[in-house]
Image: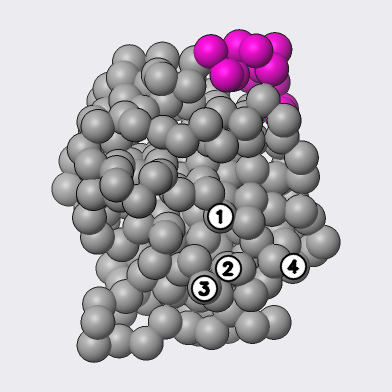
């Protein structure tokens, strides 16, 4: 099943869900099938593991990156450069907005509401999608109700509606094929409960041979881990 995204895709989720890793790898994946891709780092609250850390390898693949102004890189306030609004007003190819965690991080989206409205985006329109990343092996999202609580808080803070879910089941280096299978079943239940699409499932590239992806009723995004601690090396993004 082919994974293809275009228009504006907003990636949200709780802290530790892996949304930034998903954002980076989605950008690389879509660039690999010929899409023009830009990614905006809107994480203004978390000083660690942000999209900007992958700036060099992304640029080498021809992926555009938009960052907050230098003086606000460590800010915990929703301060955005005009270029962010420009991305939304004039989208082309795929534009990914990587948003900070939980409702606190999602607050930044409310300041962009005028830009979304100026582009005549409609709720549920395929050109604007808001995906919630779910890792059922993280605190607060180990139950369906927990996931829905996170969803409600993000929607209230951002003034936007979640339109679909991304399954990102992992325990980092301890992840097994069984974890992937259990995670898929879990996110499928969330999807069925809400009647919102299960957009795609992530699987670490080195685990792919051990996972029967034919069982999945959604596309699979291979993950080449980029956001690693200083003592580890990121997986090469070269195709």
First-in-chain label (3 vs 1): 3
> Mark 4 or mark 2, which is nearer the start of the sequence?
4
Q: Does the magenta stretch include residue 124?
A: yes
Give the spatial CA distance, label 4 vs label 3.
17 Å
Q: Which residue does the numbered mark 1 point to in the structure image?
A: 65
Asked whether the residues under the numbered discs 4 and 1 touch, taking CB atoms below 8 Å apart as contact, a structural biologist would say no
Is 94 situated left or right of 172 in this image? right
Q: Closest to the observer: 28 or 66?
A: 66
- The residue sitting at 56% across, 28% down in the picture is 85
Residue 11 in view = yes
- Give the number of the disc on residue 32: 4
Q: Estimate how packed mark 1 is, as few (under 14), some (14 to 19) or many (20 or more) residues with alpha carbons within 10 Å.
A: some
Residue 99: give x, y in percent of width and height: 40, 40
Circle 2/circle 1 CB separation < 8 Å: yes
- Residue ID for mark 3: 56
Q: Determine the residue positioned at 45% across, 49% down.
A: 67
């Amino acid at each position: 099943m082919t994974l293809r995204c275009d228009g504006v895709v907003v990636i949200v989720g709780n802290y530790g869900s892996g949304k930034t890793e998903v954002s980076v790898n989605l950008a690389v994946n879509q660039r690999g099938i010929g899409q023009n891709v830009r990614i905006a780092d809107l994480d203004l609250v978390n000083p660690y593991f942000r999209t900007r850390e992958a700036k060099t390898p992304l640029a080498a693949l021809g992926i555009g990156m938009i960052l907050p102004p230098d003086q606000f890189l460590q800010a915990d306030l929703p301060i955005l450069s005009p270029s962010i609004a420009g991305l939304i007003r004039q989208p082309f190819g795929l534009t990914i907005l990587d948003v900070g965690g939980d409702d606190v991080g999602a607050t930044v989206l409310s300041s962009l509401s005028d830009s979304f409205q100026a582009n005549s985006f409609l709720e549920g329109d395929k050109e604007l999608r808001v995906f919630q990343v779910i890792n059922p092996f993280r605190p607060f999202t180990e139950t369906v109700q927990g996931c829905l609580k996170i969803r409600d808080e993000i929607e209230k803070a951002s003034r936007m509606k979640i339109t679909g879910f991304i399954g990102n089941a992992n325990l980092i280096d301890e992840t097994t094929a069984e974890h992937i299978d259990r995670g898929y079943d879990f996110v499928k239940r969330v999807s069925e409960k809400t009647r919102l699409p299960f957009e795609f499932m992530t699987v670490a590239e080195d685990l792919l041979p051990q996972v029967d992806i034919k069982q999945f009723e959604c596309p699979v995004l291979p993950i080449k881990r980029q956001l690693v601690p200083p003592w580890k090396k990121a997986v090469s993004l070269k195709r």
